[in-house]
Amino acid sequence: MSKTSILKRVQEMTRQAQEREAEKLLTLERVKEAISEAARQGYSRTVVAPTKPGDLTKTDTARTTVAQLQKDGFRIEWEVRLQPDNTSYQALIVRWEL
């Protein structure tokens, strides 16, 4: 097996793992649940963060959810959060100021 095919294979494995993680955390339904819970507590924003380091911003799930939330008028940002072990992850911040 050539280096190129190994590289492509592991890149695809990584993409699939990221998509699976995004499906656990960033579906529109799950993010709306987080929004509702935060609103019930009187907050005007919620943060949805993965439990593992990584970047889920480019997954189909994240893109679809963000597009729908923006269409609904929410303000969206991604914030890089650095862990003590120097790994990082992207947290989704959803805002709905009064």
Image (tube, rainbow, N blue to C red):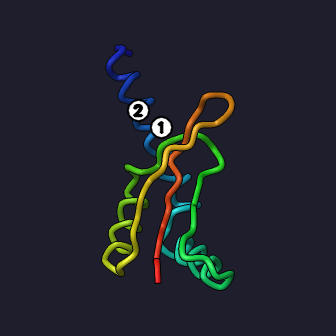
Which residue matches tag 2? 11
Rendered view: 48 above or below 56: below
Give how far across and how far down residue 79 sits, in percent.
Answer: 48, 50
Position of the N terminus, as image quadrant, is top left
Residue at far front of view:
98
Q: Residue at x 34, y 72 (%)?
A: 70
- Out of 23 and 12, give the one closest to the viewer: 23
Q: Nearer the viewer, residue 18 or 74?
A: 74
CB within 8 Å, label 2 to label 1: yes
Q: Viewed as shown, does residue 6 lie left or right of 45?
A: left
Disc 2 crowd rating (10 Å Cα; few below 14, some 14-19, many 20+) is: few
Residue 17 in view in this figure: no
In the depicted structure, whether residue 9 falls above or below residue 74: above
The kind of residue tagged 1 is Thr
Q: Amino acid at mark 2?
A: Gln
Q: Name the residue rendered at 43%, 42% in the picture.
A: 15
Image point (47%, 43%), residue name:
55
Q: Is residue 73 above or below residue 88?
A: below
Would residue 78 be visible to someone looking at this image? yes
